[in-house]
Amino acid sequence: MARIKVTMLGQFSISYKDKSITEYDSRGYKMRLLLQYLIAHRERGVSQSVLIDLLWQDSDNPAGALKTLVHRTREMLTDICPEGKDFIISRNNSYGINPDLDIEIDSGEFLHLMDMANDENLSRTKRVHLYISALELYKGEYLMNSATESWVMPISVYFHSIYISALQKCVDLLYPMGKFDKIIQICEKAMILNPADENVHESLIRALVAIGEYELAAKQYEYLKNLLMEQYSSAPSSRLTELYELTVKPRNDAQRNISAIIGELTESGKKAGCYFCEYEVFKYIFRLYSREQKRLKSDMCMFLVTLTEKEGKELEDKKLLKKAMDKLSECIVVSLRSCDIYTRYSRCQYILLLPDAKSAVEHGVKSRISSKFNRYGNRMNVALQFDFRELPVNSD
């Protein structure tokens, strides 16, 4: 026997074989709202009083009205499915969805796929397949045409957050596989559902850059910039802007004059201290330094600086963490040389890369940063942990 299929992600519908009930049918809104609520809370029965509060502001006989509504809804379901009369069951002054029926609900399948895809013991290919299957099920916000109902809103936010998480995890797995066309495909679909999501735009721009489509990447950035300004009177995040400035703009804007290019590359003003960059840029510089290191036969060293509470526990206070990380960044800048670089690796960590390891160690990098930071750290009750590693020249 065929399964009864229910769609909750996007437009609501119930279908059986070639027959269906959709939001565009001329049937009563309250019948559809009753079904939506019962399906959303299918793991438990829903009391009559809850349904009455949901469906009627005031009624002379709400219990009778509910009984009539349930009867009419069962009849509507019977029109498309022989088992429709058994879809809603009543028990102990409550109503619910019959657990004995073979019903496939897309929101439940979506969560099931996500649970499997998050299993890191599976192969990268298998996880990508599961994530893509989950993303294909998400055809829009949860009960999108009932979004104004107060009980729908938190469920909708929950499912959307999982969808964005699935998309980002899928992109992170696809990128090292070189599946840039697939990244572009899933990001373009995601932008239809949520045009202003900067994380999706960033993933799309990175994929376009990876295949050399600099003009399309530039257009994507300009589209987002105009959209944010028009709808929210804001600009793209600094991270996305830096990505554009570093990877897209230089390759998209043709320059005939090399002086103009040099002027664009040169830092404005005299900069003291070491250089901060985003992690993606840091990786490129690290690889460049590694190649130069072999040629010059010189060593490098790296520090991982972690911010914690005084007792060594992870710092949970977000406001305090931001303030302390900003102070730590200032201390790193003035403690290192202009040829050194650093980047933020996590919410509470910086990585420092220093050419000429022996010199760096002799000058006491750790003590310089600590002494400067402790003026602030003691007041904020935070501490620093250092992990040091020399990167000797590899002998070929």
Image (cartoon, grey):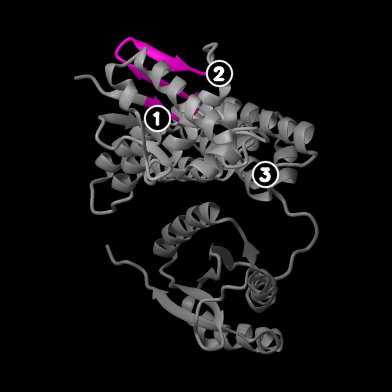
- Of residues 115 and 296, which is closer to you in this image? 115
For the point 43% across and 61% down, the residue is 290
Q: Position of residue 27 (x, y in %)?
A: 53, 14
Q: Position of residue 108 (x, y in %)?
A: 36, 38
Q: Secondary structure at mark 2?
A: loop
Distance (Cα) linking label 1 and label 3: 32 Å
- Of residues 393 and 16, which is closer to you in this image? 16
- Amino acid type at image mark 1: Leu
- Rendered-image quadrant of the N terminus: top left
Answer with the quarter of the image where residue 112 lies. top left
For the point 56% across and 88% down, the residue is 310
- Amino acid type at image mark 3: Thr
Q: Secondary structure at mark 1?
A: helix
Distance (Cα) linking label 3 and label 2: 49 Å
**Residue that mark 3 sits on:** 241
**Residue that mark 2 sits on:** 28
Distance (Cα) linking label 2 and label 1: 27 Å
**Residue that mark 1 sits on:** 137
Q: Secondary structure at mark 3?
A: helix
Is 100 covered by the magenta stretch? no
